[in-house]
Image (tube, grey):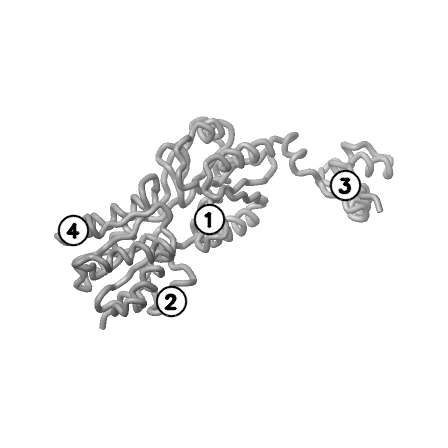
Amino acid sequence: MSKKGNTTLKELSKILNLSISTVSRALNDHPDISHETKEKVKTLAKHMKYAPNLFARGFRSKETHILGVIAPNISHLFTTTILKGILEEAELRGYRIIISESNNSETKQVEMLNTMTQFGVDGVLMSLARKTTGVEEMLDVINRIPIVLFDKVSSKIPCTQIVINEEEAAYNAVAHLIELGKQRIAILKETENSYNSEKRYAGYLRALNHYGIPVREKIILSTEDISLANGKRLTNILLSMKKRPDAIFAITDNAAIGAIKVLHKFKVKIPDEIAVVGFSNSVHSTIIQPALTTVDQPGDKIGRTAVKFLIDEIENPKNEIITKTVEIKTSLVVRDSSFMA
């Protein structure tokens, strides 16, 4: 059986003996078209399974009501909560979403951005690849359509950026450990060129400074990929030290869970000997034993907020490029990995 192409406006107009413009206006409920004609056109369109070409319509009207989303890893649990918020809020506002994954590749990120602008999206939501250094393409796109960054952002890009209160959240997490009596608090963080890691590290340092605790360089450990596997590897390094830390603050839940697994292996009592705090409140934080104390990031709210700001810029265009940072509040969820009776 041969494939049948999509039904076109031209085909509908030929069958109905109407002009293409009349058929188009009938499908779009134009007030100049009679109710009888609208019903006739819509009935045939439904019967022939006509689907409008949104991109073609967008090129004509300069609006597609489609938003592009680019994220480093769409299977990441925290990212999925953000995407859920984006999808739901966009639907409420009458917009469709195209989602693409950069796999933390700056080259692919640029390719996806260019593809989306070629498709004629009205605006783009982006969470940057880990090692994003070049911003020329994004600066060029911003001059044509709005871009809103979320989660992984950059001060080099002049646009609206939706983030959590990274530094304050990390400060609160480390302050919690200090108030439990912990003095040698290790941090597991990412290497340079990570906005999130740098902010969380700044919060860690601020808490130590506020409570008068010296910064111990030996227990500040970095890795390129702050994963469960590297959480294990870095914790093994900490346990090999002559003077072990009495707490570990990991900037992701995965790294914190990796730390807990290693502490179990060496029969270290948690939290009495070493307390552990993570970051993101992933579903795994309640499955691991002891349950992980962690910073709760409201991903759904981040996604919804990003969509609201992007659509506002699309529907209320201004002559100048908008540059602002919007911080979403977090909370510390205290569980058994740092709860001391």
- The answer to whether 245 appears left or right of 22 in the picture is left
Disc 4 and disc 2: Cα gap in Å?
31 Å
- For the residues labelled 3 and 4, the Cα–Cα distance comes to 66 Å
- 300 is higher (above) or lower (below) than 6: below
Q: Residues within 10 Å of mark 2 (few under 14, many from 20)?
A: some
Which mark is first along the chain, 3 or 2? 3
Q: Secondary structure at mark 4?
A: helix
Q: From this viewpoint, which residue is outermost toward the bottom?
A: 341
Q: Closer to the camera: disc 2 or disc 3?
A: 2
Q: Amino acid at mark 2?
A: Ile
Frontmost of labels 4 and 1 is: 4
Number of other residues with Cα within 10 Å of mark 1, as a class: few under 14, some 14 to 19, many 20 or more: many
Q: Are marks 2 and 3 in contact (CB under 8 Å)?
A: no
**Residue occupied by mark 3:** 6
Vertical placement of residue 186 versus 38, above or below:
below
Q: Name the spot of residue 220 as percent of width and height, x first.
A: 24, 50
Q: Residue at left 80%, top 34%?
A: 10
Q: Residue 65 occupies which quadrant of the picture?
A: top right
Marked residue nearer the N-terminal end (4 or 1): 4
Comes first in the chain, label 3 or label 1: 3
User: x, y percentage for residue 19?
Assistant: 81, 32
The residue tagged 4 is: 210
Q: CA distance from mark 3 to mark 1?
A: 34 Å
Q: Residue at x 78, y 34 (%)?
A: 22
Residue beneath disc 2: 288
Query: At numbered mark 2, what does the secondary structure look like: helix, strand or loop?
Result: loop
Residue linked to disc 1: 303
